[in-house]
Structure formats: structure tokens, C-alpha cells
Image (cartoon, rainbow, N blue to C red):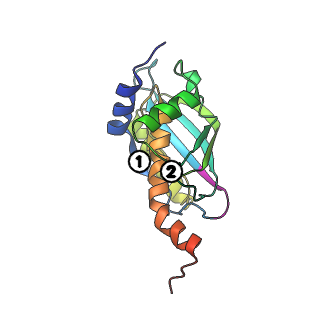
């Protein structure tokens, strides 16, 4: 089951859609649990949507020079490709995809397929998250076969969004 990773990465960059992002920034000095809902069209059942609910534990950022290594844990690329998480990490590194030196540990809580279009499921989840006033759970439309790339893209946007805050916290700069 060899997949052209370059093509899939490009597809993920083009087709990943962050419908609703986490509002709260990542923690600077302790682990952050990032809940997510990933939606994709089913490859098997046309008109159905695959729903992946899970969470990623993101360790606090550290300053590490000159090399910034990161770890992807439990992303299970082996389930959808012939490649391990380590090989995927190397693939991303070669393409200049750098995440801060943190551990990103994925735990999938629920996987289900529903007989609804992705647009209908998006509306349902947006409504559920708004009613709960949930400001932590991200809602992301992902590519179906290597959904992990979409999850990494989502995490990268959170890291970028939190970077300014992290630098201020690490340096002890208080804004008043």
C-alpha cells in the first residue's frame, strides 16, 4: 500500500479546513490537552462522513538550539500507509515542516461513520460546541486517507497562534 506522500501532503495542505479552532492558547509551562473532531468523507460509503473524536497532549515548549526536534506519538500512520510515525516525521522535516520541540501524543477516543453529508455533520458539531460553550475543541475537515496530516496542520496553526504568548511567558514579560 505505497502512497505518494508528497501528493498526500500537498492535498492535505490544500483541502484541510479548520472550521472551528481552539480559542484558548496552548499552555506555556505544562501539558495542554487539545480535543478535536476530524471529519472526512468516507472512502467506502459515498455520502457518509467519518467522524474521529480525540485529543492530542502537547507538551510545553522548550528552547533547544540549534536543532528543534519534535515527536509524533500514536498518530498511527501505519494504519493508513506503509510508513511509521518516525518515517513521516522525517518526510515532514525534509520538506521544512518544523514544529517546536514538543511531544504530540494522539489519543483517538471515538471513531464512527454516519449516513450524513459532511456539511450536515459540520452544522451539527458547530451547534453542539456552541451550545456547550466549548472553546477548546477544534473542528476540522480532513483528507480521508491520511487524516493525520490534517491533524498535524491543525496543531501547527495552534502552535503559531500561541508562540507570541509563549515567548512572553518564557521571558517573563507581563502585559498590563
Residue at 46% across, 14% down: 2
Give percent across and percent down for residue 30. 67, 61
Q: Is residue 33 magenta?
A: yes
Residue at 53% across, 58% down: 131
Give percent across and percent down for residue 52. 56, 36
Give percent across and percent down for residue 56. 61, 46
Which disc, if any, is residue 35?
none
Query: Which tag, 1 or 2, sits closer to the chain's start?
Result: 1
In the picture, measured across the screen, residue 104 lies left or right of residue 115, that is right
Q: Can residue 21 be seen at all in this image of the molecule?
A: no
Residue at 58% across, 70% down: 170
21 over 106 or under it: above or below: below
Asked whether the residues under the numbered discs 1 and 2 touch, taking CB atoms below 8 Å apart as contact, a structural biologist would say yes
Q: Can residue 159 be seen at all in this image of the molecule?
A: yes
Q: Which residue is mark 2?
A: 138
- Residue farthest toward the left in the current orientation of the protein: 14
Between 5 and 145, the one nearer to me in the picture: 5
Q: Which residue is mark 1?
A: 18
Characterize the local packing of mark 1: few (<14), some (14-19) or many (20 or more) Cα atoms within 10 angstroms. Answer: some
Mark 1: which secondary structure?
strand
- Residue farthest toward the top in the current orientation of the protein: 1
Between 33 and 170, the one nearer to me in the picture: 170
The quarter holding residue 12 reads top left
Amino acid at each position: 500500500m505505497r502512497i505518494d506522500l508528497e501528493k498526500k501532503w500537498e492535498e492535505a495542505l490544500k483541502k484541510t479546513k479548520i472550521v472551528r479552532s481552539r480559542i484558548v492558547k496552548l499552555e506555556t509551562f505544562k501539558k495542554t490537552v487539545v480535543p478535536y473532531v476530524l471529519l472526512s468523507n468516507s472512502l467506502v460509503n459515498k455520502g457518509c462522513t467519518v467522524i474521529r473524536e480525540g485529543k492530542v497532549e502537547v507538551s510545553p515548549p522548550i528552547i533547544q538550539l540549534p536543532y528543534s526536534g519534535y515527536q509524533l506519538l500514536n498518530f498511527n500512520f501505519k494504519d493508513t500507509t506503509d510508513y511509521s510515525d518516525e518515517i513521516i516525521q522525517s518526510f515532514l522535516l525534509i520538506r521544512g515542516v518544523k514544529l517546536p520541540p514538543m511531544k504530540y501524543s494522539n489519543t483517538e477516543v471515538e471513531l464512527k461513520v454516519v449516513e450524513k453529508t459532511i456539511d450536515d455533520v459540520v452544522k451539527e458539531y458547530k451547534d453542539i460546541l456552541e451550545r456547550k460553550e466549548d472553546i477548546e475543541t477544534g473542528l476540522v475537515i480532513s483528507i480521508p486517507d491520511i487524516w493525520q496530516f490534517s491533524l498535524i496542520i491543525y496543531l501547527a496553526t495552534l502552535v503559531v497562534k500561541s508562540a507570541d504568548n509563549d515567548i512572553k511567558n518564557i521571558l517573563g514579560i507581563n502585559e498590563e
